[in-house]
Image (cartoon, rainbow, N blue to C red):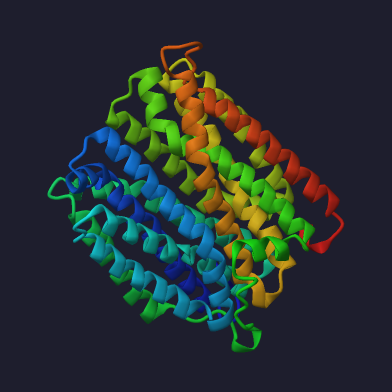
Amino acid sequence: MRCHGRGGGMINRNLLVLASIVFIDMAGIGLIVPVMPSLIQSLTGQGLDHAATWGGWLLFTYALMQFLFAPVIGGLSDRFGRRPVLLATLALLGVDYALMAFAPSLAWLFAGRAISGVMGASYAAANSCIADSIPAERRGAAFGMLGGAGAAGFVLGPAIGGLIGQFGDRLPFVAAALLCAAGTVFGWLRFAETLDPDKRRRFDPFRSNPLGMIVRMARIPLVIGCLAAIFLMQLASQAQLSVWAYYGTAKFQWTPAMTGMTIALFGVMIVLTQGVLSGKAIARFGAVRTATISLLFSIPSFLTLAFAPSTPVVILGVIIGAIPGMCFPAMQQLMSPCVAEDAQGELQGAIASTISLTAIIGPPLMTWVFAAYADARGIFFPGAPFVVAAGLMAGAVTVLTVTLLRHAGQPSAA
């Protein structure tokens, strides 16, 4: 994305740094995923089944802390500026990974994942920089760029972590720490503050928590409607995140390599649709049309996955399912003008908390549905979670469409 006019060079440089930070956040998470089962087993002395249970609770801890602290990180960035908050959270995330590399017990690992969840909430400050420095009509492309950077980290992180992990369970944590350190130095040297001092507000604890966030955002109908749609969208997406490997193994006897290839394909497609195509679509068709039309593709995508008779059909469903990736940047472009300049961090914190809440609710819901239809009793239907996801997406399409129709006459929804 190019920004013309005065300050365009600085904006482009900031976008590069922001994309790097988001990439590092996601890559750092992905780096440690391949070694978590064996590390948990070595710390507990228990089998893989128990390790999977502990791994689920570690994910829950991470998501819970993000849910609680995303509004705090957003509020702090509204008070002190984006640069110090972004650099501090990234540096502390690196320290946390370094400490986890030497974790002597499972409790130590839980503490580390809790701290990672807090520091990983820097998403709110990163996206706030877009609203600070880019005109409202061009923010969608920049939001999409950050989303694409995160997807790239999602794809490359586990692949690199798997390779490094062959030489030791602790090494991916060291690599993640070094990656965060490099990102902090890069940001310190190249990132310029985007929030002017006269546009900052005092830190309000009531506003900087999930409950206060809901009360605040409920006063803005377009924003609360979009947040409701995001909640349903992300809850549906938990079907893929929670049961994908189990679904492929039960229905198609996938090997781990095949599972990894399908995940990588989806990540690459998200990089393309969200990071590249979303800005072009918003510029040509407008944010409203891009959001609503792209989201419609999620319903046939999930139904295709649910009833797919073969792996090639699953791949088709994955490709179709990447198109809704354009919806999220478009919604961010629609929401950001509705919020005051000194509350952009608060808005992005609300979005991050909404997404984190689905990561708390979604895994137990989707794994329960999968287990109910993948055992030896009753109907064998491993694709059942994707039917639930299609229903949730239909709800998201309805909520988003009604919200945008109600506010079509207002500038913020244009």
Q: Nearer the viewer, residue 163 or 376?
A: 376
Query: Where is residue 215 drawn, in percent x and y?
Result: 72, 63
Closer to the camera in the image, 78 or 144: 78
Front-most of residues 302 and 113: 113
Q: Residue at x 71, y 66 (%)?
A: 216
| Left or right, residue 193 beside residue 5 | left
Above or below 52: residue 63:
below
Quadrant (top left, top right, bottom left, bottom right) of the N terminus: bottom right
Q: Nearer the viewer, residue 143 or 41?
A: 41
Residue 297 in view: no
Where does the image place residue 404, in percent across and percent down from the top left? 78, 50
Q: Quadrant of residue 339?
A: bottom right
Q: Residue at x 53, y 50 (%)?
A: 274
The image shows residue 250, relative to residue 15, as above or below, that is above
- Viewer can see residue 197: yes
Task: Identify the residue at horizontal 51%, vertical 81% (top origin).
Answer: 193
Q: Position of residue 98 (x, y in %)?
A: 24, 65
Where on the picture, by quarter, is residue 390?
Answer: top right
Q: Position of residue 158 (x, y in %)?
A: 31, 46
Classify the position of the C terminus by image quarter: bottom right
Residue most extreme to the left: 167
